[in-house]
Amino acid sequence: MNARNLLTLVISSLLISGLVIDNNQASTEMFAATASTEESELSKLAHKMEPGEWAELKAKRPANLMAVFVGYRDSGKEVWHHIAGWTDDGKWDPKTRQFLFMGFRKQNKFISYSEDSNQWRVLPGPFGWNTSAPGTFKDTRKTGFGHVYGRNALDTEHGIFYVYLAGYTYAYHLQDGTWTRTPGGSGMTIEYFPGLGLLSHETRPNKSKTGFPLALLKPRRNTWEPFAVLPFSGYHAIVHYNPKLDEMIFFAGNNDRSVVTINHKGQVTRQEDLPFDMTIRHGQVVVDPNTGLYLIFHQGLLYEFNSRTNQYRPVIDYRPPWGKYEMPVPAAIPELGVILFVDDKTLLYKHSPLKN
């Protein structure tokens, strides 16, 4: 019996019993019935996994999902470039149950995984590249090599995916698939702080040369305003919001070991320096959805960082499950307690925290 038939039987039974159900309650019951009887492939796999385990999610995907076509060699062989080098910036939206990432290597490519359909697809970007859909905006940028770095952000509350491109911060509205834009933003790092707004980590120091500005986008005014000053540049920085601790962490990157966290008031806390050099090319940071620990994947190694105890600890038995030339993009899925990585395969990881 499918979910809809089951719901009809339940409602009929209640009506016969003399109970009254309003439309809102019926809608809620329908959602609950659907969720309980039609578990997704993603959730089924996540629920089977043990802490410390990796598993492959068999999801449909178009050819060359993680690459863009850029031309031909003299031999006539096609040339494709990977869109995800120098980034760890995938985003998961719990409301629409999808993974979102816009990569860049000569051209932008906006990809999405849907939990409902268990498949990947390419979405139209603001310029319409790599899809048959026309662009909302004219592309005035020069198509150099480039990387996406930390230029993706997601506001889950309002359903807005942000990406910085050539002087503008573009906003993709998940509800209707439309694009808008705001002048300004960082060419290296933007990130959304829930309850506060979109933050932009600048690459040039402030006028007094005492630090690097962190600007806040005021949506109603559509302008950027000063929010905090950080001790290092946004150039190659790795930045993520931690929903467990309601803080944002900044790793300096580019072989600078400095680390800071900020709260929603803009208070900056200096953390213990990284115990190793890390670049955005070889480093990925993900907030563990179960513990709030920062998981640092770096050149075949995995470290836990606890910002409350200021302690780094290596995960001794960790082995990366991807190939030498892969550059997987991660995003935590809090409601399932796993992290999704995408490159040649779609992989799930459930972390097993180290014992004290």
Image (tube, rainbow, N blue to C red):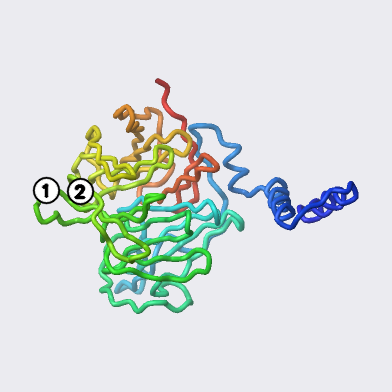
Please tell me whether residue 60 is drawn above or below residue 45 in the rendered image.
below
**In the rendering, which numbered label is found on residue 210?**
1
Q: SS for tag 2?
A: strand
The local crowd at label 1, few if under 14, some if 14 to 19, many if 20 or more residues have their Cα within 10 Å, is few
> Relative to the observer, which residue lies in front, 55 or 48?
48
Please tell me whether residue 193 is drawn above or below residue 221 in the rendered image.
above
Q: Are marks 1 and 2 in contact (CB under 8 Å)?
A: yes
> Relative to the observer, which residue lies in front, 349 or 157?
157
Q: Residue at x 24, y 32 (%)?
A: 272
Residue 253 at x, y = what percent? Answer: 23, 46
**In the rendering, which numbered label is found on residue 229?**
2
Quarter of the C terminus within the rendering: top left
Q: Residue at x 32, y 27 (%)?
A: 309
Residue 221 at x, y = what percent? Answer: 33, 65
Residue 173 at x, y = what percent? Answer: 47, 65
Please tell me which of labels 1 and 2 falls first in the chain: 1
